[in-house]
Amino acid sequence: MKVRFHLLNGKNFMKWQIIDDNDNKSYLDPQKVTLTLYDCYLHNNPNIANKIYSGKTRKDVCSWIDCKKIEVEPASLQIGKPISYNPKIKPYWFDSNDNNIDGYRFDVLTTNGNKVIEPASIAV
């Protein structure tokens, strides 16, 4: 499955887009749901991202998260380390320390509104 933030103008603007293994698309309002993503891989197309970063093109799909499983729950506050992607700022996925994390794998990622979070582990 693929998850990305949909930025094309229209009724699904600024919603999470989920593409399942059969290429079916669904759109979820980030203010209404929290997504928990399992077995994740951060994809980036650096050719397109670098064009956006340098101002040569406006918006083209250049990043998404591949994951094996998604759980959808009512929106709730998620705490953890932010994972960011905005090719106008940096042409790659980056963590809270500004490290390039293109191609990184995560066991679990979650969303908090339109943000992606590496959840904080809770000691039991």
Image (spheres, helix red, strand yellow):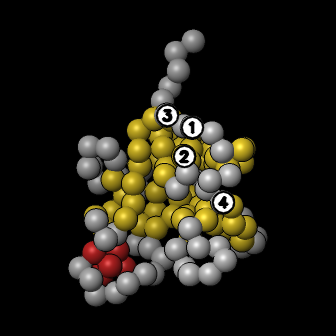
Tell me which amino acid carries mark 1.
Leu
Say whether disc 2 or disc 3 marks the residue closer to the N-terminus: 3
Label 1 Cα crowd, 10 Å radius (few <14 / some 14-19 / many 20+): few
- The residue under label 1 is 77
Residue at x 65% of width, y 73% of height: 12
SS at badge 3? loop
Say whether disc 4 or disc 3 marks the residue closer to the N-terminus: 4
Q: Is residue 76 visible?
A: yes
Q: Is residue 21 left or right of residue 13?
A: right
Say whether disc 4 or disc 2 marks the residue closer to the N-terminus: 4
Label 4 Cα crowd, 10 Å radius (few <14 / some 14-19 / many 20+): some
Tell me which amino acid carries mark 2.
Asn
Which corner quadrant holds the C terminus?
A: top right
Q: Are marks 4 and 3 in contact (CB under 8 Å)?
A: no
The span from disc 2 to disc 1 (Cα, nearest Å) is 6 Å
Image mark for residue 112: 2
- The residue under label 3 is 79
Q: Are marks 2 and 1 in contact (CB under 8 Å)?
A: yes
- The residue under label 4 is 29
Residue at x 34% of width, y 69% of height: 87
x then y, percent, for residue 119: 50, 35
x then y, percent, for residue 106: 49, 43
The span from disc 4 to disc 2 (Cα, nearest Å) is 11 Å
Q: Nearer the viewer, mark 1 or mark 3?
A: 1
SS at badge 2? strand
The span from disc 4 to disc 3 (Cα, nearest Å) is 19 Å
Q: Is residue 61 left or right of residue 66?
A: left
Tell me which amino acid carries mark 4.
Asp
Q: Are marks 1 and 3 in contact (CB under 8 Å)?
A: yes
The span from disc 2 to disc 3 (Cα, nearest Å) is 8 Å
Q: Are marks 2 and 3 in contact (CB under 8 Å)?
A: no
